[in-house]
Amino acid sequence: MHTRSAMILFDQPTEAGRRFTALTDTEQGVVIQRLGVLLRTVAPVFLLCDPRDLGVSERVRDPHFESPCLYVYDQYPGGIGLSEGFLRNLPAIIRGAQGVVDACPCADGCPSCIGAPDAPPAPAGAVPGPAAGAEAVVIQASMVNAKQSVRAFLSAWAAALEG
Ligand SMILES: [Zn+2]
């Protein structure tokens, strides 16, 4: 489908990019994925659209730009201006996202804010099988407090946008 998309690259020359690349690899993965969840919920409120009208795709290392990247795209052929509206309203959307995270009483993320916490790590003594590498990634990710990481990054991003 041909459509229109906004791309947000978190690469070095911007303040948000510097903050993002200062995170550990594990945190980068957690933060960008959770930002995607949050933007899917928050952006439609500002764009007065149905959540299904807007697509969000996260890349820790986009193969084209070789940078961490968020795509926010129109789900309509040709686009109906949602991605442009997203960029115009970005500072307000990021403040709105901060509001959602701050107001949520959960400790480390839930479906009402940044998405449910990751599945708990495999119990001690689990036999390492062929998926041991994947398990290690899950265990590492579960050691990051996703909500704290997202909150800290959003705060830096909002400050950078307001310059
Ligand atoms: Zn929550």
Image (spheres, rainbow, N blue to C red):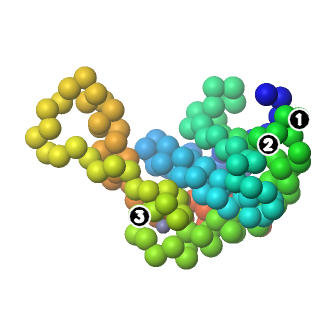
In the structure shown, which secondary structural element does the residue marked by tag 3 occupy?
A: loop
- The residue at 38%/51% (across/down) is 118
Mark in front: 1 vs 3: 1
- The residue at 46%/41% (across/down) is 25
Please say if the residues under marks 3 and 2 sit with CB atoms less than 8 Å apart: no
Please say if the residues under marks 1 and 2 sit with CB atoms less than 8 Å apart: yes
In the structure shown, which secondary structural element does the residue marked by tag 2 occupy?
A: strand
Q: CA distance from mark 3 to mark 2?
A: 30 Å
What label sits on residue 78 in the rendered view?
1
Mark in front: 3 vs 2: 2
- The residue at 69%/30% (across/down) is 65
| Residue located beneath label 3 in the image | 108
* Kind of residue at disc 3: Asp
Q: Is mark 1 within 8 Å of ligand 1?
A: no
- The residue at 83%/50% (across/down) is 82
* Kind of residue at disc 2: Asp
Name the one closer to the observer, 50 or 79.
50
| Residue located beneath label 2 in the image | 74
Q: Is residue 8 visible?
A: no
